[in-house]
Image (tube, grey):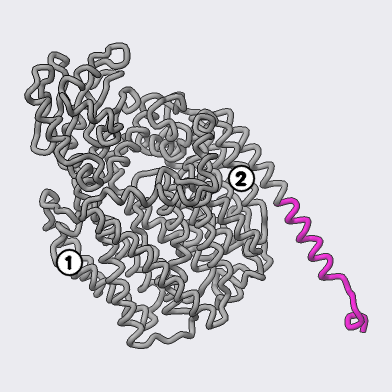
Amino acid sequence: MWVVIVAIGQTASVWADAGPPLQPSLSIVFVLTVPGFVILDLEQPKAFTARLMLGVAGSIGLNVALVTLGLLPSFVWIAAVGVFAFWGTQRYLAARLLRLEVARASRPEGPGRRR
Amino acid sequence: MFVAAMVLLWAWSLAQTDESAMGGYGLVTILPITAFVALMGALVGYAVAAGRAERGPVLGTYVTVITVMVHGVPAFVYDHLRFSWAWKHVGVVEFIQRTGGVDPSVPVHPVYQSWPGFFGINAWITEASNLDSALSYASWAPVLFELLFVGALFVLFRGVTSDPRLLWTGILFFTLGNWVGQDYFAPQALAYFMYLMVLAIVLRWYATDASGIHGSSDPLDDAIEPGTLPSLAVGVVLTLALMTIASTHQITPIATIVVLAALRLARVMKVTWPVVAIVVFSLAWMFGPARDFVVDNIRGVVTEIGGVESNLENNLVAAEFFNETQLRISQMSRLLSALIAAFAGLGLWRRRRHRLPTKWVVVAAGAPVLLVLLSSYGGEVLFRAYLFALPFAAFLAASLWFPRSQTVSTRLGIVAMGVVLVGLTATLLIAGFGADNRQVFSDAEVAAAEFLFENARAGALIVEGSRDYPRQHRNYELFQYLPLDRSTPETLEGLLQDPATRIAGWMSDTERYSGGFVIITRSQRESVTALGTLLSPTLDRVEQSLLESDEFELVFEDRDARVFAPAGQQ
């Protein structure tokens, strides 16, 4: 949910200002929100520094992407859709593989188990 | 407590510096002896603390303090932004602020218009902060980026070792071995941070069991169990980091592809999608927004592929013309690189003796060397390859002292580490900051540049002694530039016969230029003398000719800079 809110807010802030770069105050709030989200919401990793650095990298990455979106609208929209499609696909496949692995591990097999 | 005393002594020392007294070896010539005492105290303090196996936060405090002490000095001591190319980057930010976007058809520095990620976000930060120019904060970029590098390396090394001594000593070797100076206000600094984060994520969350990375660690409170899927957020951050790299810099995507592909081929990384993603993002960017630049430059890029010898020569041959001081500075940088490589080699040997996994670190340290096969990167590829390999070479170097958590330090080992750290720092201060007398600018030089870039008309020809002065920070795309030290021998020969008449002839060509200026500064003189790009009397002769000529008038003069314009232009 946080990701969705941040993404909508960031996108809104990009388009809120016709001129460059972006609508300042709204964006600042969301810039700060991204590391906050990563720091507070992540289950992994538990270490604060790792969460902080992931938050900073994520925030910079998201903002570079969105600023670039402002500079080069059509391309980045296409790229963003592509990224999420790619990411979703690999997550789906990974989850399927994990389920298969779990199913295989729980299957009774071998003479030891029969006993 | 001890480290706090060293910080106070260091801060007091910096307040005593006089930038105008800088000599041939740059920063070290203006630092008071107490600054060296403070730095040496912190380094020796670290060696003792590591030898006593102090807790991670203690060691981390030392490393953070030393990083700021070494790489933060310019921000604290110099009045103006260091490096003329950082000023140029401020100019690209100003372009986006002024025009509202990028324009790859701009003939001056089209490469920045084609990879604008860093400039775009800085235009946004500048505007959001209500600042007039990125100059307001650009001097602090090295401090920020070096601390970000420390943070990224902490995440990376924490995934491969639970020994705080190895972790923090590795980061310290990185900090002291980083003479390349890619932490300033530039796209590569941002892209390099992302590169470190990509490797941190990959090695920590996507490492195979066979790599031995997790098996070598003691149980950590945040250790990822082998086989656990990384969280969605980690994957999103990795994707964003890869996108940022692709849209921000030219060589970092290639380095990222090379290293990630090598880690995958060596079965260190258990997924292929990050390799596919960075390849797709990079190609999409190159043949999308950066298409014009790529098409215009493709022939040169293709020619360089596989040309190891010529790519290396491009990096080394220029040193033939250096003066003695610059030659020593250059030798110091090579010495520092060689020392890091030597300690890394010894550390690798010690890790192998202890039967610790080394494949992942050898692959990550070795893969960037392949960059030399691909490009000369404007004569910088050797330095960049070193920089991309440095984190892992530094980790190996630290392994020489702390191969495993049970290793107990001997007194001799602690003394040796103290000596090595002090030696590396002394070399770094010359290698990284030795050329500052041509890369740091006085009030007069900044005022001259302000005058020039504010008063020049669109289409003006700007004749410069060299590029080493605070240039192009405003309206940079409106002018044409002629740095004399990059002119052909024929042009220079013709110029020196009668400099004023020849330059007046150029500037009177109204079809090509709308007037112009000639700017000659102290930093330009230092630059052409140190690098041997012009014979030393050349700029004096040009300046004298302009002073004596009726065709030019002196429109700006201060202690370190003069600006000339055709008579009657102003």
Extreme left residue here?
Answer: B548
Residue B72 appears in view: no
**Chain hosting mark 2:** B
Q: Which residue is mark 2?
A: B279
Q: Amino acid at mark 2?
A: Val
Q: 10 Å neighbourhood of mark 2: few (<14), some, or many (≥20)?
A: many
Examine the structure image and report whether residue B6 is included in the region drawn in magenta. no
Q: Secondary structure at mark 1?
A: helix
> Which residue occupies 51% across, 45% down?
B245
**Bounds of the magenta segment:** A91-115
Above or below, B476 against B304 in this view is above
Label 2 to label 1: alpha-carbon separation: 49 Å
User: Residue B136: which quarter of the image?
Assistant: top left
Dominant secondary structure, magenta = helix
Dot 2 or dot 1: first in sequence order is: 1
At which x and y percent is residue B534? Answer: 22, 39
Which of the image's four quarters has the N terminus of chain B?
Answer: bottom left
Q: Amino acid at mark 1?
A: Leu
